[in-house]
Image: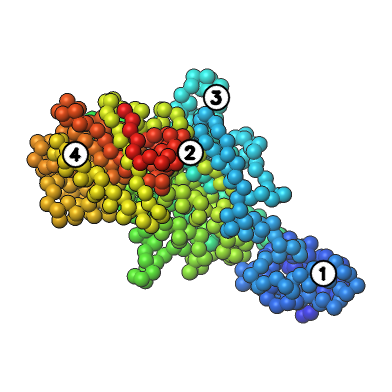
Amino acid sequence: MEIKEVSTLTRKQKRAIKFGANSNSINTVEIENSEDFDFIRENAYDDLLKKIKTKKRRIIDISNNLAEITFNKESFNDNQEIADELSAIDEVDADDTLISGEISHVGGIIACTESGEYKSEKEYCDILNFVIKYHIDTENTNNNSDITFDNIIINPKVKEKWNLINYKNLKDKTLKEAKVPFTPLQDKLFNPIFTYKDVLFQNESEKNKKELRDFYCLHSVNHVMNTRKNILQNNETIKLASASGEDIEEIKDQGFTRPTVLIITPFKETCFEIVQTLIQLSGIKQVENKKRFREDFHGEDETDPTKPLDHQKTFKGNIDDCFRVGLRFNQKSVKIYSDFYTSDIICASPLGLRMVIGDESEGNKDFDFLSSIQIVIVDQCDVLLMQNWEHIEYIFENLNLIPKDSHDCDFSRVRNFYLDGRSKYFRQTILLTRYSAPETNSIFGKTLKNIKGKFKTKLDYNQKKNLSHTNLVLQIPQVFLKFDANNISDLNDSRFNYFIKNVLAQISKSVSKSRTIIFIPSYFDFVRIRNYLKEHNYNFAQLSEYTSPQNISRARLNFFKGNVDLLLITERFHFFRRYHIRGSFQVVFYGLPSRSDFYQEFLNRIDVEKSLGEATSQTLFSKFDLNLLERVCGTARSMKMIEDGKSTFMFS
């Protein structure tokens, strides 16, 4: 059926144009006057994506229901504005998106995020230290700077439980008496997190870990419960309209699959604490599989009390790093171990999730359950870096893709940005870590494309309390050796050559050469140095993440007794074991440690009394190591060291 005049359209037909509803009574609308064009432009083009298929035709794809609108350009010769608009349409490529005759505002923002055209603002505050805010600079940008806990939509049950749970995090007595909803740290993060910006928080510590975890659990539960409430209300609206025969506007409230929140964490014990908090915040008392979950994920074992506090808290309880669990929130119950496709929240380790996704080469790859994730939270990135960061990168590569199967999806209710493959621009990602690292910065800078903007924090390393070389118990000469590297690709070779010629040769001539620890951050560098020492018959022992318990004991004993000259230690070994290596006279840092507290730990354990006055440390660095060097020496001093023409610097 071909309709010539818009004025002849029935109310039902106009709704078909406006909302893309399925209507057998309308196939093609041929534009013949400006009033008709205005109707189509102001209605059909308001909420739908229009893709140009030919020079004079646009197709609106609504869940496999196609409505064609043909433009008759010759009819508009008397209207220059419309004629110019149609001429512009002719010149647009097939992949461009137009709304109301212009490139859409959202499409423009997406183009800016792809090209990295974020505008940045840097500020400083006592709580977060340095803060960098990124946003797309457009006329319609809304920073939502005035939102508060009272004027955003918080589920009543969640709000009530939050005040009880977060009370313990309010350390200040005046805050407790005032009954404020957030700690000072949570208050600073409230706006970026609840306005769905991407967040890279690089100030995580044992002191603030609990309040951060509670805070993102609040955000996750509130998001899920509001989403489910909206869907259920819409289900009822559709049901009532269907029963009464009433036409309603098209409802878009879903993604391809049900899961909307993904939480990635390193160990089962951490996952157990997160799930417990999520359930408490929901206010739902009926929990399925609660006993099974506690048995699988919770451990009572405590760590060695003689080890540093951060190690005790990180490795307490169940430290299995291969797990995944789904949570489904119903109105009156929560189900743990729900199937991923019926879950609202997925909590998993990188390894556990990688095994579920599978691999294309094995023919069992399944990423569909990640297609509609709206919030991703990666907790303890610093710990995950000590596992296998490639799993994190693989997970992000498989987020928000178009699913291979339908999984009983109601496509008529799927939001347009999912159908158009642009859901990654609407996804929020929250990264929490102790320190800045190239891997997290790469994810934040290159992978995340949130149109709402980004928010990044960084510690002020000009403050002495944040530095390692100033927090030493022993007064030991600390020597920093700068080597030249032309570019990042030559860095490893330049470091190795400098170490062999300048450092190892000096150690061999030293009186106390039999008590030298060589700390090596990278396992690949560790293997390279180990092979060199073997070839040249050095007397050494080695400790890596792959060393057996028997060989660990043997190496520690031989080093303490002086039976070996050198002891090679990888950073991962020290992170997971945190042994007190006794008997060292010198420490050589082949590279700066990722965790600056490792620097002071090794130096504070040097046996100064038996070192014959040669107790010292040597640290290799290049101009590419500023990010690591500033955690030890401070930002201002590190900049001077890198820019200075000298190659040797000494502190005590």
* Location of residue 22 (image quadrant): bottom right
Instruction: Identify the secondary structure beneath mark 2.
Output: strand
Amino acid tagged 2: Lys
Amino acid tagged 1: Asp
Q: Residue 290: where, in percent of width, then height?
A: 36, 44
Labelled pair 3, 2 in contact (Cβ < 8 Å): no
Instruction: Identify the secondary structure beneath mark 3.
Output: loop
Which numbered marker is on residue 516? 4
* Location of residue 461 (image quadrant): top left
Badge nearest the viewer, 2 or 1: 2
Residue at numbered disc 1: 84
Q: Residue 577: where, in percent of width, then height?
A: 23, 41
**Of callouts 3 and 4, which one flags the residue occurring earlier in the amino acid sequence?**
3
- Residue that appears at 59% across and 58% down: 115
Amino acid tagged 3: Lys
Label 2 to label 1, Cα distance in Å? 50 Å
Instruction: Identify the secondary structure beneath mark 4.
Output: strand
Residue at numbered disc 2: 458
Q: In this view, does 84 lie to the left or right of 58?
A: right
Badge nearest the viewer, 3 or 2: 2
Residue at numbered disc 3: 179
Q: Residue 571: where, in percent of width, then height?
A: 28, 44
The N terminus lies in quadrant? bottom right
